């Protein structure tokens, strides 16, 4: 695992956008797995800037989701589909045709999760998967004690994660209890994992993931199993390493 410490979130965004530019130069139709939350936004802003000024041609890129809430109405601004379309797909000049995601409103959620897992494989697998990290060490929505070999499936959010994500909704009550998330085993199949963490609030989770024992209690520690994992942290998130 490679650990890269950068001064701040903006520098992290630039660094990762440069790596994605290199990937798309080598493989224009690469499948890029994107994460939601606040942390990766500087990456998406840096990518959009590169497209605008001609440093990046992302026209053939394909984008896929890491996870999704279950049961938010179609078009809800905080469904992860809406977030990824707004923050990544549209700014890169792409359309929904280039986008893969699980159906959080399917009548059979378990089947929708399995179908999404299969769709990722059929698309040739994820070339680069961006990850954030929860304060409890989760990746995607794989909460502590998720199986390290889990596949895409339905999960129940912990109260901590619902509270962490309540800032995107009008109240805690509106945060869904259930989600579809790529499993840890699914995530580990991506060819390159890039986890970004910024800010002091993530410092403990980062230290446990990177320097702690491999454990389902800290899902992000699964990156220790991956042959090509990069953890990018700012000074604050690196403060307990
Ligand atoms: C959610 C997402 C994760 C993300 C996490 C941290 O739980 N499912 O993919 O990493 O939030 O979000 P933030 O970057 O806003 O702290």
Image (cartoon, helix red, strand yellow):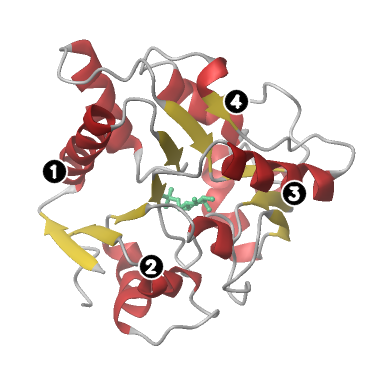
Where disc 1 sits, the SS reads: helix
- Which is nearer the eye, 153 or 124? 124
Q: Which residue lies furthest to the bottom in this view?
A: 213
- Which is nearer the eye, 27 or 221? 27
Residue that appears at 32% across and 20% down = 58
State left or right for residue 177 relative to residue 85: right
**Residue hosting label 3:** 114
Question: Distance from label 4 to label 3 (Cα)?
Answer: 25 Å
Mark 3 surroundings within 10 Å by alpha-carbon count, few (fewer than 14), some (14 through 19), many (20 or more): some
State left or right for residue 201 relative to residue 31: left
Q: In this picture, is 139 found above or below 28?
A: below
The percent coordinates of residue 170 (x first, y second) are 62, 36
Residue that appears at 59% across and 45% down = 121
Disc 2 or 4, which lies upstream in sequence? Answer: 4
Q: Quadrant of the N terminus?
A: bottom left
Disc 1 or 4, which lies upstream in sequence? Answer: 1
Disc 2 or 1, which lies upstream in sequence? Answer: 1
Residue that appears at 58% across and 47% down = 166
Where disc 4 sits, the SS reads: loop
State left or right for residue 130 relative to residue 139: left
Disc 4 or 3, which lies upstream in sequence? Answer: 4
Circles 2, 1 touching at the beta carbon (< 8 Å): no
Which numbered disc covers residue 11? 1
Where disc 3 sits, the SS reads: helix
Q: Quadrant of the C terminus?
A: bottom left
**Residue hosting label 4:** 77
């Amino acid at each position: 695992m490679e650990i890269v410490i950068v001064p701040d979130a903006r520098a992290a965004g630039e660094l990762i956008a440069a790596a994605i530019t290199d990937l798309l130069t080598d493989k224009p139709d690469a499948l890029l797995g994107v994460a939601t939350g606040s942390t990766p936004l500087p990456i998406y802003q840096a990518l959009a800037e590169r497209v605008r000024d001609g440093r990046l041609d992302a026209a053939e890129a394909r984008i896929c989701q890491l996870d999704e809430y279950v049961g938010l109405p179609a078009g809800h601004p905080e469904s992860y589909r809406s977030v990824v379309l707004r923050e990544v797909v549209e700014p890169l000049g792409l359309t929904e045709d280039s986008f893969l995601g699980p159906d959080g409103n399917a009548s059979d959620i378990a089947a929708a999760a399995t179908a999404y897992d299969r769709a990722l494989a059929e698309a040739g697998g994820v070339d680069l998967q961006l990850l954030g990290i929860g304060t409890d060490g989760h990746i995607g929505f794989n909460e502590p004690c998720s199986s390290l070999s889990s596949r895409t499936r339905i999960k129940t959010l912990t109260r901590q994660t619902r509270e962490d994500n309540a800032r995107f909704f009008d109240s805690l009550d509106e945060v869904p209890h259930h989600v579809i998330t790529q499993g840890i085993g699914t995530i580990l199949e991506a060819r390159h994992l890039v986890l970004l963490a910024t800010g002091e609030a993530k410092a403990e989770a980062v230290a446990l993931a990177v320097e702690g024992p491999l454990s389902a209690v800290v899902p992000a520690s699964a990156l220790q199993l991956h042959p090509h994992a990069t953890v990018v942290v700012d000074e604050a998130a690196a403060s307990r390493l």
